[in-house]
Image (cartoon, rainbow, N blue to C red):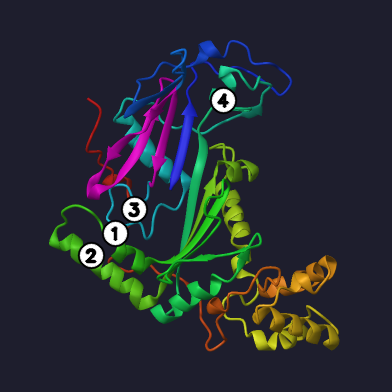
Amino acid sequence: WLAAYQLHHEVLPVVDAEVEISGVEGSFAVLPVVAEKLKSQADLATGEVDYETLTGLPVRGSYSTSLKIKCDGSTVFVDGNPSRFCRLDNLFGFQTLDECIAVYNRVLAQFGLPPFTKSTLAVHASVPDNSSVHKRLGRLVSDGARIARMDLTCNFALGSMADAYAYVRGLSSVCHRGTPGRLYGNGAATTWGEGSRREMIKLYLKSVEMRTHKVKGDLTETEQDYLTRLADYLEQVGCAREEHEYKALKLKDEGCSVYGLFNEAKVSAMFAKSREFLTRGNVALTDYQRVAETLLSSGLVESPITARRLQRLVNCWLNGENLSLSMSRSALDKAWQTLRVLNIDIRIPCDITRLMPRVRTVELRPLAMPDFYRPASLDSIIVLNRAA
């Protein structure tokens, strides 16, 4: 998924952090207005309109796929899934941000709108909070596109669906920012950070998702056979898909919001950092009765007495005891710091239904692209409802 926008200037003003923006209002380009609806809010007592906003126009592609585009005359906005647009599936999508932007630019061209371009400068300008310039630009001014949302995914093969289900269920007990994952009722998906304004992480079984959310519309027999064959392949290898949804605040903090002023290496570093909690220690299949032995063998503690004390705390936690009532805050935090390396969070209640004993080793491998797969290509982009 990718959401991008760009304010198009006829002449970009030269500004810096110490200079007020002047004359910016007259520098906006005049572009065609593209939207589905105009929404307004008015004061019933006075009849005055408080504000007006445009809603995005759905741009339809083949296989019931769509994007949303919007232009208010100066700012162009596109929101959607470029790797899914005009395709039967998005198991393997585009690998770079440039390719995704290229999809959007092809669509924008068919509506008479200028393309997204890379920024060459971005400065924090001194703009009054209540000014119209601030509402359009914010504090950061750039001469290219900005990224408002970016979703990154990776696929893994676990060998079988049984191992894949065990993997998803086991990881649901892992805590991210003090909260365990939300395990879906079918046991095929776990999420962290739902409703967050910064980041949401999802782990799910791709074959289950494909069979549950089938492609809408009439498909040829060849296309239907392709999707069935692909879902069968994913079940055979036990495919689990990891998905990270980065929102505007997260992208800004990581320096990945101004298109052109960051590279793919920075995006990869952000991705690796955000999934670190999923790879810390034996996260999915911890043997909770051998915590003391694990702590000593891994060098996390040096004293056998300390290891046995932490083992007793884990046993109490497994039995549902609220450790915060029997320990001081500092002692609980110290024990938590050590046990969290094994992804055991003793500060929150234990859900015994999610804990998986160490009964087998699950090997996590990158998913190989099958030889019959139809990879993403710009040549497949065909807009069905072009501008008149």
Identify which amino acid the numbered label 4 is placed on.
Leu
* Disc ID at residue 137: 4
Tell me, yes or no, whether the highlighted magenta stretch contains residue 60.
Answer: yes
Tell me what residue is drawn at x 65 percent, y 82 percent: 319
Residue holding disc 1: 374
Contact check, label 4 and label 2, Cβ < 8 Å? no
Dot 3 or dot 4, earlier in sequence: 4
Identify which amino acid the numbered label 2 is placed on.
Tyr
Residue holding disc 3: 376
Contact check, label 3 and label 1, Cβ < 8 Å? no
Kindly tell me whether residue 215 is visible in this rendering.
Answer: yes
* Disc ID at residue 226: 2
Q: Quadrant of residue 55?
A: top left
**Inter-mark Cα distance, 4 to 1:** 40 Å
Q: Which residues are magenta?
A: 52-81
Residue 128, image x, y percentages: 66, 19
Furthest residue to the front?
A: 45
**Inter-mark Cα distance, 3 to 1:** 7 Å
Residue 342, image x, y percentages: 68, 75
Give whichever of 184, 259 is nearer the camera. 184
Q: Nearer the viewer, mark 2 or mark 1?
A: 2
